[in-house]
């Protein structure tokens, strides 16, 4: 297995983003869905230039997180903030994913939320997304927000999704309740291509540079 990618999600502040420029982070996520970390397209436009200041490795890719967006919502954000990847967290159909991918020339990561019983809340079968997705993410299902619950999912549910991603030649990422003290166990158990963290590197709801540094060090070894 190659080096595991790190995605830090839910960035809202220019100052916090500037504090991260020395960390080898692969993806930076901005939340446009309803959430306490939600930002607007205009705010994202202020944050994106900071990614060009990155001094540790390649410039991170920007990821916009949406839950069942309309094309109008996407259009409004993307006109202001040219994101690299759209991460769709709802029940977006394969047809919708394809339409968005073609219309905006962006990569599409589809999140599949795992419920407490290990079943997956999805808009279609996995097979129907073949050839459409550029990445697959498993997260813990949150009935209110779709994801971002800060709770780990039933890891045993991951294997068919990981295998599908391998077969499709796209990265498999894992999210949901990760933090510096459990990410190494997840990596050992699931062997993902990438891990995605948000609340697990916060203190009192604010991104904590010490926790982010510890998380990245545990992942990158």
Image (cartoon, rainbow, N blue to C red):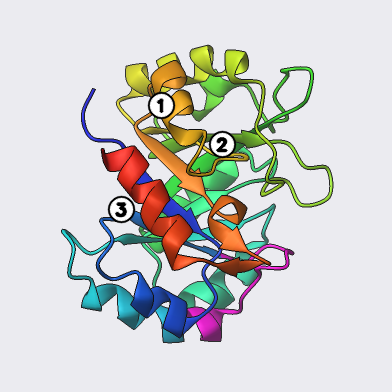
Q: Which percent across, then down, holds residue 174?
A: 50, 34
Residue under label 2, please give it. 94
SS at circle 3? loop
SS at circle 2? helix
Q: Which percent across, then down, holds residue 199?
A: 61, 55
Is 64 located above or below residue 39 in the figure?
above
In primary-sequence order, the first of circles 3 and 2 is: 3
Mark 3 to mark 1 CA distance (whole Å): 16 Å
Q: Residues within 10 Å of mark 1 (few under 14, many from 20)?
A: some
- Judge depth for marks 1 and 2 and give the one in front: 1
Residue under label 1, please give it. 187
Q: Residues within 10 Å of mark 2 (few under 14, many from 20)?
A: many
- Of residues 65 and 217, the one drawn nearer to the viewer in this rendering: 217
In primary-sequence order, the first of circles 3 and 1 is: 3
Q: Residue at x 24, y 67 (%)?
A: 22
Q: Residue at x 73, y 36 (%)?
A: 141
Is 191 located above or below residue 217 in the figure?
above
Magenta segment main secondary structure: loop
Is 139 located above or below residue 149 in the figure?
above
Mark 1 to mark 2 CA distance (whole Å): 28 Å
- Judge depth for marks 3 and 2 and give the one in front: 3
Whether residue 91 appears in magenta in the rendering, the answer is no
Q: Residue at x 65, y 33 (%)?
A: 152
- Of residues 147 and 98, the one drawn nearer to the viewer in this rendering: 147
In primary-sequence order, the first of circles 1 and 2 is: 2
Asked if residue 133 can be seen in this view, the reply is no
Question: Start and end of the magenta stretch?
Answer: 31-44
Circle number at residue 26 = 3
Asked if residue 146 can be seen in this view, the reply is yes
């Amino acid at each position: 297995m190659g080096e595991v990618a790190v995605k830090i999600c839910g960035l809202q502040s220019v100052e916090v983003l500037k504090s991260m420029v020395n960390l080898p982070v692969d993806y930076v996520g901005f939340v446009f869905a309803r959430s306490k970390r939600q930002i607007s397209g205009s705010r994202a436009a202020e944050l994106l230039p900071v990614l060009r200041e990155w001094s540790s490795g390649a410039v991170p890719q920007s990821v916009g997180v949406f839950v069942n967006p309309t094309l109008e919502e996407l259009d409004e954000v993307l006109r202001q903030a040219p994101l690299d990847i759209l991460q769709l967290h709802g029940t977006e159909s394969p047809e919708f994913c394809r339409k968005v991918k073609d219309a905006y020339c962006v990569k599409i990561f589809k999140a599949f939320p795992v419920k407490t019983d290990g079943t997956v809340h999805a808009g279609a079968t996995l097979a129907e997304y073949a050839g459409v997705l550029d990445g697959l993410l498993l997260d813990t299902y949150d009935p209110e927000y779709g994801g971002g619950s800060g709770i780990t999912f039933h890891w045993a549910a991951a294997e068919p999704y990981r295998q599908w991603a391998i077969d499709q030649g796209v990265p498999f990422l894992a999210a949901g309740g990760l933090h510096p003290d459990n990410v190494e166990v997840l990596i050992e158990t699931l062997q993902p291509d990438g891990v995605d963290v948000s609340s697990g590197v916060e203190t009192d709801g604010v991104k904590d540079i010490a926790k982010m540094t510890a998380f990245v060090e545990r992942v990158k070894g």
